Image (cartoon, rainbow, N blue to C red):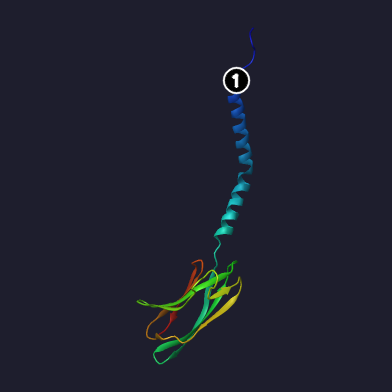
Amino acid sequence: MASLGISEVVGATILLVIAVALSLLIFGYFYGYLESLGYSLANMFSSSCEFSIMSTAFNTTGSSITSISIALYNYGDKQCGISGVYILNESTAYQVAVASNCITNPLARLGPGQVLMLNYSNLNIPYNTNYLVKVVSCDGFTAEEGGLGQ
């Protein structure tokens, strides 16, 4: 008896081609949505704190800096934990304050849009050259301001 129709291999191949074509059509339709969703997720996980040093003020006794005040402003949309404050010159880095455990106990927490004053005293840093004040956050963001010193 003669059978009419196509073989199983040809039928399976045609079904596979139809399935791939439909999946490409659906992917093309939703591609823009998936791309923007991916960017949103990437930005959510990669946002870091952003702050700047508004001003610095220091007191001197004789030829040494004895205290410093630093005003910080968080212009980002994430809370910043401050992990370290440093005073640098061409050859030396003076560690003013460093957090022992930045996750649970940072030096300070700086909320979005907040201004914060950091005050440190009992310093003994030579006052004879230009210094750079550097503040570092727990996620590695840094803010610097120069012009401290003679």
Total count of labels = 1
Which image quarter holds the C terminus? bottom left
Which quadrant of the rendered structure holds the N terminus?
top right
Residue 23: x and y in percent read 61, 36
The amino acid type of the residue labelled 1 equals: Glu
Q: Position of residue 127 (x, y in %)?
A: 39, 86
Q: Nearer the viewer, residue 26 or 104?
A: 104
Residue 99 is situated, as x and y percent measured from the top left of the image, at 49, 74
Residue 110, position as x, y percentages in the image: 58, 73
Q: Nearer the viewer, residue 54 or 34?
A: 34
Q: Quadrant of residue 2?
A: top right
Q: Which residue is mark 1?
A: 8
Please name the residue shown 40% across and 81% down the image.
130
Q: Residue at x 59, y 29 (%)?
A: 16
Outermost residue, bottom side = 62
- Say which residue appears at 44% left-offset and 89% top-offset: 60
Residue 28 image-quadrant placement: top right
Callout 1: SS: helix
Seen in the picture, residue 79 relative to 7 is either above or below; the reply is below
Q: Is residue 26 left or right of residue 50?
A: right
